[in-house]
């Protein structure tokens, strides 16, 4: 049954991942767009903390996790995002529904493998600067697209409480941006249209270690490192004379020849370190630190003097609680209750202001009776950016849902 579900979701979501507009943030203009959270709903509900050697859930953060799986696991998730964009002059609301991840994990004794598809970044902004002067110049900017990653991972359990792993990611995507200028009282304007095709390969290594502190108490640790990598970018630029309406619809009147440019972008290296303490199948409290280099993501279409990049940092604290994992009489005692808080310095500096992200999250893991599978719900509330220095503050609420389905493969049937 799980194989049929996987095939259906792969066909559907591989198309959705290209078609979706995954953000409404004006900050997605910079670099390769908004870098999305890499992890499952279970992890997001704990602010990104995932340090335990879980046997029924996939850990997308650390490739060493796959050898800990006991059953074939399929996981998929999506998010509904409500955002209020606010600056000194007013506010606007935006809604987005996104596909977040699709992954499969296969246990093979001491070896485990995994593969899947993850949207890595999203571009989806619309901004407008209007002049109230006769024949004054107005500017509209809008962009769509993003980068996705197809990955393959493998891990090996060296001893029962220690595993290592690695994964390879193939990044691919397309970003389209438009810069349109026109004057009040004139029905024609100029449009600069940029299309960038992006692709590259990068590698990630990880380790998980678990130690007994007492009969019930465990210490969990997680370490992973993503290498700095190159992303090839081929961009085309076209400048046209266009007519326009009051909306963002443009009609080409005259077009110039296209210009093509190729360059290499640098995706930053990233170090993740997590520690946790808890009782297996009962509770866990953990913390995680992510440190990333600043990289070099300036492309021909997004180079601007008021933007620079810095080292990124993220701090997370989270955990879960299960009242009674083995309860047969009370379903609510088997529910997993999750929570977490985060603080992030995103690495983006605009108008000399570091763009920061703060938030907290809650979640529920609802077991599917008669199986190890579960449905996971998550809620995240947070704030990114600032209204200082003519910037935009984003207040967001995210509602997420994910499936984690488990089945036993590669077992020879005794009866047909």
Image (cartoon, rainbow, N blue to C red):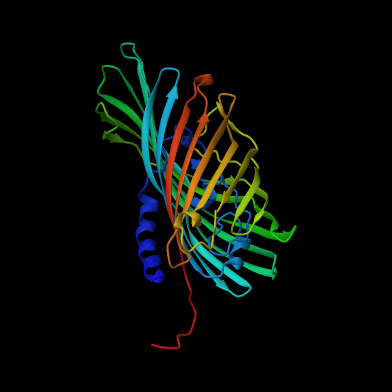
Depicted 144 relative to depicted 277: above or below = above
For the point 74% across and 59% down, the residue is 214
Can you give x and y, in whole percent of width and height, for residue 198 in the image? 48, 50
Can you give x and y, in whole percent of width and height, for residue 305 in the image? 55, 27
For the point 70% across and 57% down, the residue is 218
Can you give x and y, in whole percent of width and height, for residue 373 in the image? 46, 63
Q: In front: 100, or 282?
A: 282
Res 158 quadrant in image? bottom right
Res 340 quadrant in image? top right
For the point 62% across and 66% down, the residue is 155
Query: What is the residue that sits farthest to the bottom in this orientation?
Result: 415
Q: In front: 28, or 209?
A: 209
The answer to whether residue 182 is visible is: yes
Quadrant showing the N terminus: bottom left
For the point 52% across and 33% down, the residue is 303
Res 238 quadrant in image? top left
Quadrant showing the C terminus: bottom left
Query: What is the residue that sits farthest to the front in this orientation?
Result: 329
């Amino acid at each position: 049954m799980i194989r049929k579900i996987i095939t259906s979701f792969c066909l559907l979501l591989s198309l959705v991942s290209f078609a979706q507009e995954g953000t409404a943030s004006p900050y997605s203009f910079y670099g390769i767009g908004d870098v999305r959270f890499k992890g499952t709903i279970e992890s997001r509900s704990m602010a990104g903390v995932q340090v335990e050697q879980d046997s029924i859930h996939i850990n997308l953060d650390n490739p060493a996790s796959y050898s800990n799986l006991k059953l074939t696991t399929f996981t998929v998730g999506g998010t509904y995002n409500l955002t209020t964009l606010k600056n000194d002059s007013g506010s606007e609301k935006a809604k987005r529904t996104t596909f977040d991840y699709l992954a499969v994990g296969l246990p093979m004794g001491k070896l485990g493998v995994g593969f899947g598809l993850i949207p890595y970044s999203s571009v989806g902004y619309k901004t407008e600067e209007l002049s109230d002067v006769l024949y004054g110049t107005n500017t509209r900017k809008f962009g769509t697209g993003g980068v996705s990653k197809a990955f393959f991972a493998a891990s090996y359990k060296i001893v029962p409480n220690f595993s290592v792993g690695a994964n390879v990611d193939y990044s691919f995507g397309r970003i389209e941006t438009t810069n349109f200028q026109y004057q009040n009282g004139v029905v024609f304007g100029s449009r600069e249209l940029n299309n960038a095709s992006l692709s590259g390969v990068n590698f990630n290594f990880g380790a998980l270690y678990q130690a007994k502190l007492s009969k019930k108490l465990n210490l969990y640790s997680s370490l992973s490192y993503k290498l700095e990598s190159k992303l090839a970018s081929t961009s085309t630029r076209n400048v046209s004379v266009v007519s326009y309406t009051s909306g963002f619809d443009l009609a080409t009147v005259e077009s110039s020849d296209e210009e093509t440019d190729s360059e290499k972008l640098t995706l930053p290296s990233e170090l993740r370190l997590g520690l946790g303490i808890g009782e297996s199948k009962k509770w866990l409290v953990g913390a995680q630190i992510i440190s990333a280099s600043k990289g070099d993501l300036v492309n021909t279409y997004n180079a601007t003097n008021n933007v620079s990049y810095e080292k990124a940092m993220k701090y997370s604290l989270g955990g879960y609680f299960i009242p009674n994992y083995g309860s047969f009489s009370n379903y609510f005692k088997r529910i997993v209750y999750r929570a977490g808080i985060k603080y992030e310095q995103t690495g983006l500096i605009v108008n000399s202001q570091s763009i920061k992200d703060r938030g907290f999250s809650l979640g529920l893991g609802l077991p599917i009776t008669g199986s190890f599978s579960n449905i996971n719900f998550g809620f995240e509330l947070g704030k990114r950016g600032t209204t200082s220095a003519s910037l935009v503050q984003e207040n967001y609420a995210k509602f997420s849902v994910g499936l984690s389905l488990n089945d036993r493969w590669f077992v020879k049937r005794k009866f047909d």
